[in-house]
Image (cartoon, rainbow, N blue to C red):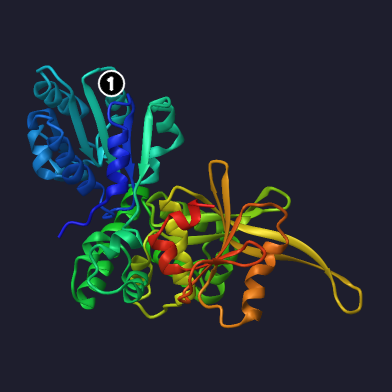
Amino acid sequence: MEIGRDDYLNKLISRKGNGLIKIITGVRRCGKSYLLNTIFYRHLLECGVPEDHIIRFAFDSADDLYLIGESLIDMRKAGRGADPERFMAYIRNRTAEQGTYYLLLDEVQMMDSFEAVLNGYLRRDNVDVFVTGSNAKFLSSDIITEFAGRGDEIHMYPLSFAEFMTAYPGDRYEGLSQYMLYGGIPLVVLRESPQDKAALLENLFSEIYIRDIVDRHGVRNRGELEDLLNIVSSAVGSLTNPEKLKNTFHSVKRSRITSATIKRYLDYFQDSFLLEAAQRYDIRGKAYIETPRKYYFSDLGLRNARLNFRQFEPNHAMENVLYNELRMRGYRVDVGVVPVAERDRLGRVTRRQLEVDFVCNLGSARAYIQSAWSLPDEDKRAQETRPFAKIDDSFKKVIVTRDVVPAQYDDRGILTVNVYDFLLDPNLLAGS
């Protein structure tokens, strides 16, 4: 069964022939290779592009590397990438005729000097380049400098809930429960039994994600790295920082790990797209607060597998799902802070900070969102809407709840919508 990725396909189609290197990034196994080499490849054929004018090459494929006289095993033993001269000679032999050639290059960071090679192809009017990469260093400041503004990133996530539901046989209520438990990695979604899903997620972590990080960064203490990942997994969506995490290590693990090492490990997790950090933003003061931050998993199935599915908090899971959905829709997402000063019954002034779960920005548009698993009574609703009353602007304010209620505005202009409608209808947020 094929799961459509129409949003990403349309992004690729709209960028054809734009004179830039189209770069698809994302966590491993989110579907980048399938998007490029199957879905987009099929689109090109349907548009009449001759098959011999579409060159697909995967730098993590032993068979493809053999075509240029390279060995994946030798490359790994020597700690080097593929020889760019061999690859360019191969491409020269394949692009001798007239007409536009499409280069679909998978895991291109596994070729040495790939930045220079890609920039060289931009000088050819008859070559259109599309590539994938699986770590954020693929778009590091050094690489951006090399591309000199000629890279066009398309960041890909695991399946959205809407994409997930095209492959799920049940209703959306049970579907969301499964989505929050096992996530949206396409290979996992297409497995049938819970045991198979869990086993695949656990295997992906141990055999791909952790090993990639250890190998790429030369991590010496894999145990500490995995312990940190477990701690972050347990506190998903909670405010934290390296110093706080260091104290947890010292008290619980009796470890002497430093906050600098923890920061470096957190960077590695973000570098591999396993985690994203949401920074706090002072809504009134219009300024960012550097620390602490919240960390969200790019896929909840991976997070749950990390904890052997023993620690599942539906309210935090829904918050993580909403964060990912907003990022998929292109929003920059921060954690909102609203400082307030209030007097108690004795007239004493107390200062505190009210939190808005998400401050979402897309161009000049903004929305404030609260994630509330349930709104059982007016007290809970008042708690969720209180920060909104302290925000002095006219941007959209939304409460997303699991309660099955129709989308409706109250007399203050606050929209309440159930999570199922929110995830399946992007216009609920876009239209205002």
Q: Which amino acid does label 1 sit on?
A: Gly
Q: Nearer the viewer, residue 115 or 429?
A: 429
398 relative to 35 in the view: left or right: right
Residue with the most extreme bottom position: 376
The residue that appears at 67% across and 64% down in the rendered structure is 412
Q: On the image, numbered disc 1 is attached to which residue?
A: 120
| Image mark count | 1
Q: Evaluate whether residue 233 shows in this view.
A: no
The residue that appears at 29% across and 74% down in the rendered structure is 171
45 relative to 419 in the view: left or right: left
Q: Quarter of the image containing the N terminus? A: bottom left
Q: Is residue 189 above or below residue 71?
A: below
Q: Nearer the viewer, residue 363 or 237?
A: 363
Q: Nearer the viewer, residue 144 or 278?
A: 278
Q: Which of 194 and 307 is in front in this view?
A: 194
Label 1: state its secondary structure. helix
122 relative to 259 in the view: left or right: left
Query: Residue 72: x percent and y percent?
Result: 15, 43
Q: Evaluate whether residue 4 shows in this view.
A: yes
393 relative to 190 in the view: left or right: right
Q: Is residue 241 above or below residue 330?
A: below
Residue with the most extreme right position: 347
Query: Residue 392: x percent and y percent?
Result: 73, 54
Query: Residue 396: x percent and y percent?
Result: 59, 55
Query: Residue 242: x percent and y percent?
Result: 56, 60
